[in-house]
Image (tube, rainbow, N blue to C red):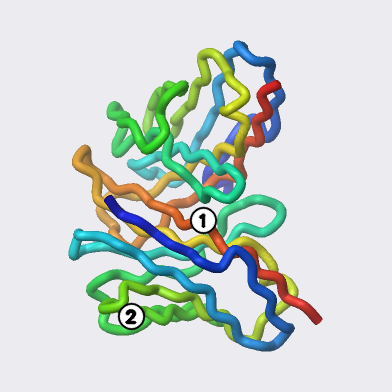
Amino acid sequence: NAGVTQTPKFQVLKTGQSMTLQCAQDMNHNSMYWYRQDPGMGLRLIYYSASEGTTDKGEVPNGYNVSRLNKREFSLRLESAAPSQTSVYFCASRPTGYYNQPQHFGDGTRLSIL
Amino acid sequence: AQKITQTQPGMFVQEKEAVTLDCTYDTSDPSYGLFWYKQPSSGEMIFLIYQGSYDQQNATEGRYSLNFQKARKSANLVISASQLGDSAMYFCAMRERLTGGGNKLTFGTGTQLKVEL
């Protein structure tokens, strides 16, 4: 069971570089999410996609863009990386219409910006 | 806006004993759900248990149970018979409905649990 797959698992960037974090799910879920996790702050929502073809800003969208390429894939792009974006990034998905269903998370991408 | 509060940054418990991890929440939405996730040192997020606001009974899943007190707006996680493998960070999260459709989770800051021999 692959579930939610994130690539890469680790990445080091220099300030100003760009990068795309990839996420794919094989559970036929409609909704997908990107979170970032910083020490002492829990997970915070960056962007989400309630269904294929739609994306919306979450709590901390500045400095990021997303693309819902198809139902399976939801990518997160950093156009000009900044040290403040050093974090662990999680992608998640869940089915729509099932209120008690949890979000399923990928294993995370550890990103360091120097 | 919804808010989740976990006031215990760290907890210790002895193996085979029970432990309660606190979670309080604040919302104006009468329909909400509360989730607990476990994050071991390897980093993945593991779903443990769910409680809906309209559920009549407290949720249970194996050694995990929820002490859900709606009037107090608390949803504490109880782990019975703690094991060394329970050492991890535990997050409480609340489901919030979104105007654009779907829903999102608002997370607390987590409680680091350490199980000792």
Q: Which residue is mark 1?
A: B109
Residue B17 percent coordinates (x, y): 66, 88
- Residue B68 occupies which quadrant of the picture? bottom left
Kind of residue at disc 1:
Thr
Local crowd size for mark 2, using a 10 Å CA cut-off: few (<14), some (14–19), many (≥20): few
Q: How many marks?
A: 2
Residue found 61% across the figure and 35% down from its top: A87
Secondary element under disc 2, as helix, strand or loop, is: strand
Quadrant where the C terminus of chain B lies? Answer: bottom right
Local crowd size for mark 1, using a 10 Å CA cut-off: few (<14), some (14–19), many (≥20): many
Kind of residue at disc 2:
Gln
Let me know if residue A7 appears in the view: yes
Q: Which residue is mark 2?
A: B69
Residue A74 percent coordinates (x, y): 44, 30
- Residue B69 occupies which quadrant of the picture? bottom left
Report whether mark 1 lies on the same chain as mark 2: yes
Q: Which mark is residue A76?
A: none
Residue A27 percent coordinates (x, y): 44, 46
The one nearer the camera, B92 or A11, is B92
Residue found 18% across the figure and 65% down from its top: B30
Residue found 58% across the figure and 14% down from its top: A18
Q: Earlier in the sequence, mark 1 or mark 2?
A: 2
Secondary element under disc 1, as helix, strand or loop, is: loop
Residue B108 percent coordinates (x, y): 46, 57
- In the displayed structure, does residue A113 sit left or right of residue B116? left
- Chain letter for the residue marked with disc 1 in the picture: B
Name the residue at the right extreme.
Answer: B117
Q: Are marks 1 and 2 in contact (CB under 8 Å)?
A: no
- In the displayed structure, does residue A46 sit left or right of residue B63? left
Q: CA distance from mark 1 to mark 2?
A: 20 Å
Let me know if residue A69 appears in the view: no
